[in-house]
Amino acid sequence: MMLEPSIDKLQLKINSKYTLVTLSARRARQIQDTKRHQLDNPKSFKFVGIALEEIQADKLTYIPSDAKD
């Protein structure tokens, strides 16, 4: 079974696995609470999967705290 989007493709967007997991978990909670996401037709039925698809589609990005200044 292949997981989509793949971890390799996602790490091209966000290079840290820890950051990727944290960001997708936070976004999944937001999607669960609001029932809103930024994709037209997500492939996943689970909130974490939708969050990962948003990252892959460049709908969700991460700005490191040291880059905010």
Image (cartoon, helix red, strand yellow):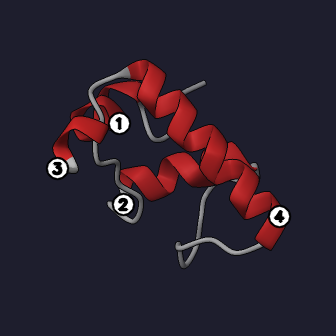
- Residue found at the far bottom of this picture: 40
In the shown orientation, is residue 67 left or right of residue 42? left
- Residue type, mark 4 in image: Asp
- Mark in front: 2 vs 4: 4
Q: Which residue in the protein does label 3 denote?
A: 69
Q: Residue at x 45, y 41 (%)?
A: 5
Mark 4, other Cα within 10 Å: few <14 / some 14–19 / many ≥20: few
18 or 59, which lies in front?
A: 18
Percent position of residue 16, x then y? 34, 22
- Mark in front: 1 vs 4: 4
Numbered label attached to residue 33: 4
Marks 2/4: CA–CA distance: 21 Å
N-terminal of the pair, mark 1 or mark 4, is: 1
- When asked about the image quadrant of residue 58, the answer is bottom left
Numbered label attached to residue 10: 1
Mark 1, other Cα within 10 Å: few <14 / some 14–19 / many ≥20: some
In the shown orientation, is residue 61 left or right of residue 52? left
